[in-house]
Amino acid sequence: MKSRWLLFILEIFFQQGFAQIQLEKQLAFAESLFAQEKYFDAITEAKRLSFFDSTDQYSFKANNLIAESYRQGGKLSEAVHYFTRAEISSHDKMELFSTKIEIIKINVLRRAFYLADHQLNELEKDQRFTAENSSLQYWRGWNYLFHDDWQKAAEVFGKIDSVATLKNICEEVQKKKYSVSFARGISIALPGAGQFYTGNYVSGILSLGWNVLFGYLTVQAFSAERIFDGMVVGTMLWLRFYNGNLSNAEKFAIEKNELIKNETLDYLQKNYQGLKP
Amino acid sequence: MRRIFFMGLLSLFPSILISQDDGLFTPEKRKAFADYLFCEKDFLRAAEEYEAVNSDNQNDSLKYKIGLCFLKMGEYEKAKNDFSRLRNSSLGEESKLLMLKIAFFQNDGNKESTEPSFKNEAYKTASLRLASAIKIKERITQTNLISLGNMLDENDKVDFNNIFSNKERWQRKSPFAAALFSAMVPGAGKIYTENYGDGITSFIVTGLFAFLAYDNFRAHHNTRAWIFTGTAAFFNAGNIYGSYISARNYNLEREEELNNEFDSFLNSKNYFVPKEIEGSCK
C-alpha cells in the first residue's frame, strides 16, 4: 500500500516537473524569436505559453514579451494592453514599476502627453517608488520633449546630472525655433516680412506685391472719391490678401518648428545612446 | 529496496513518454490554442494554427475555421477560396451562405454568387434577404426596396423603412444641371444642390464685381474696370465649377449617409446570417 502511494507521488512529481520543463522551453523559444527580431512569431509563441500556463507562473514574462514585440512592430495600443496584463501579474514592486514605466513610455511615444503626465504624477505620489524619483524625472523630460515643450524638457533634464547631453539638445532646439507671434507681428507691420523671417522669400515677395497693388487701388479709389469702389477693393481684395499674409506667416513658422522638432527627434532616435521611449 | 527502485522506474515511464511527444505542439493542443486565438479575435494567428493542424490532419471543420478567420480579417478572396472548396461537404450550406455574405462585402451581384440553393429553411431565408440587400447596395430602386422590405419581420421592416422612407434621401442631383444653372444665374446651381448659403454669396459677390466692372467702364476707369471684370469672371468660373462639385458632393454625402445607415442596420442583423455559423465563443 505504502509503495503505491510512493508511486503515485513520484508520478505526480515527475509529470509536474516535465510540464514545467515544457513551459520553460517554450519561454526560451519565444525569447529566442524575439532576439531574432521575429516579432510576429515571438508573439504567437508567448501567447501559446500564456495559454498553456495554467498556474500563471509565466504570465508576467509572457505578457511582457508579447507587449514588447507589439511595441517593436509599432502596434502601440496592443502593447499597452499586454503591458497592463503584465502589470496585473507582476510578482514584486520592481516588476510593477517597470511595466508601469513601459506603459508611460508608450504614451510618450504616441503623444498622449496628459495621460503620461498623469501616470507619472501617480507614480511620484506612490510611496513604494520614492527611490525611483530620478527615473520618473527622466521620463517626464521625454514627455515634455515629445510634447514640443523643449524649455520644460531642458529644465527637467537639468535636474539629472547624467543627462547633460539631452539638456543641451533641448536648449539648442529652443533657440533654433521660430517665434510664431514674432512672424505674425512683423507681417502686421510689413506684409511679407514674416515669410522673409522664416526663409520663404518668394512667398514674402508675392505677399508684399499683392498688398501693395490692392492697397494702391484702394487708396486711389478713395482719392478719386469713388468710395464704394474703395470699400469693395479694400475689404474684398486688400483685406483678404492682408489676412492671408498674416496666416501664411504663422503657418510657415509652425511648419519650420515642426521640421526642427522632427529632425531633432530623428537625431535622438538614431544617435542618442541612453534610454529612449 | 529493489521494489521501490522498480516502482520509481515505472513512475518515470509516463513522464518519459510526455517528454518524447510534441509538448505544446500536438494537433489537439494546437487546435485548442487556435480556438483560443479565434475567440481573442487574433484571427491571423488562429488561421496559421488551424492551417498547421490541417496540413497534418485534413478535415472540413478546420478548413471552415480557416475560411472564417479570413472572413473576419476582411481577406475575402482567401475566405471565398476556402469556402468554395467546402461546397459539397457537410458544411456546404454554411459555406455557401458565408460566400453570399462575402459577395455583399465585395459588391458582387452576379447571379451565380447571389442565387445558391439551400435545403435548410433558415439559410434559405437568410440567403434571399442577403441577395436582395446586394441588389439594393448596387442600385437603389423602388422594386429592390419593396423586395427586401417584404421579406423582413415586422420590427426589422420598421427600421428598414425608416432608412429609405424619404425618397429625397436616395434621389440624386445632376452635376451638369448644377453647372448649367450656375452659368445662367450665378449661385443657382448651388441653390439647386441645397447649398443655400454658398448660392446666395456667389450671387452677391459675382453680381457686385460685375456691377463694379460695368460702372468703372462707364466712368472710363479702364484699369479698375478690367480688374473687376477679371475678378467677376474668376468668381463666376469658380462658382460654375463649385456648383458641379457641390452636386457631386451632395450625391456622395447622401450615398454615404444612406450606405452607413443601411450597413449598420444589416450589421445589427449580422447580414441576416445566423451568428452560430460564424464560430461560437464562450
Image (tube, coloured by chain):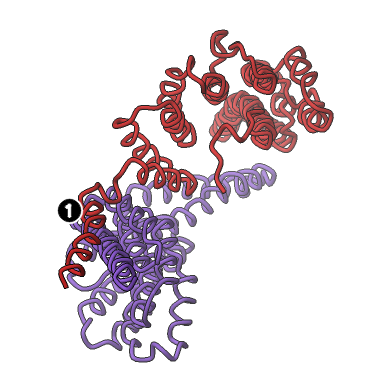
Chain colours: A purple, B red
Task: Examine the image and state in which quarter residue A26 appears.
Answer: bottom left
Task: Examine the image and state in which quarter residue B278 appears.
Answer: top right
Camera-side residue: B108 or A170? B108
Q: Position of residue A47 (x, y in %)?
A: 36, 54
Q: Residue at x 56, y 41 (%)?
A: B280
- Quadrant location of the N terminus of chain B? bottom left
- Is residue B183 among what the camera can see? no
Residue projecting furthest to the left: B2
Q: Is residue A49 left or right of residue A231?
A: left
Residue B129, placed above or below residue B210: above
Chain identity of mark 1: A
Camera-side residue: A7 or B124? A7
Give the structural element (helix, strand or loop) at label 1.
loop
Residue B30, placed above or below residue A170: above
Task: Examine the image and state in which quarter residue A81 appears.
Answer: bottom left
Q: Which residue is mark 1?
A: A36
Q: Is residue B44 left or right of residue B151?
A: left
Residue A248, placed above or below residue A189: above
* Mark 1 residue crowding within 10 angstroms, few (<14) / some (14–19) / many (20+): few
Q: Residue at x 61, y 23 (%)?
A: B244
Q: Position of residue A109 (x, y in %)?
A: 37, 63
Q: Position of residue B54 (x, y in %)?
A: 34, 31
Q: Position of residue A75 (x, y in %)?
A: 37, 53
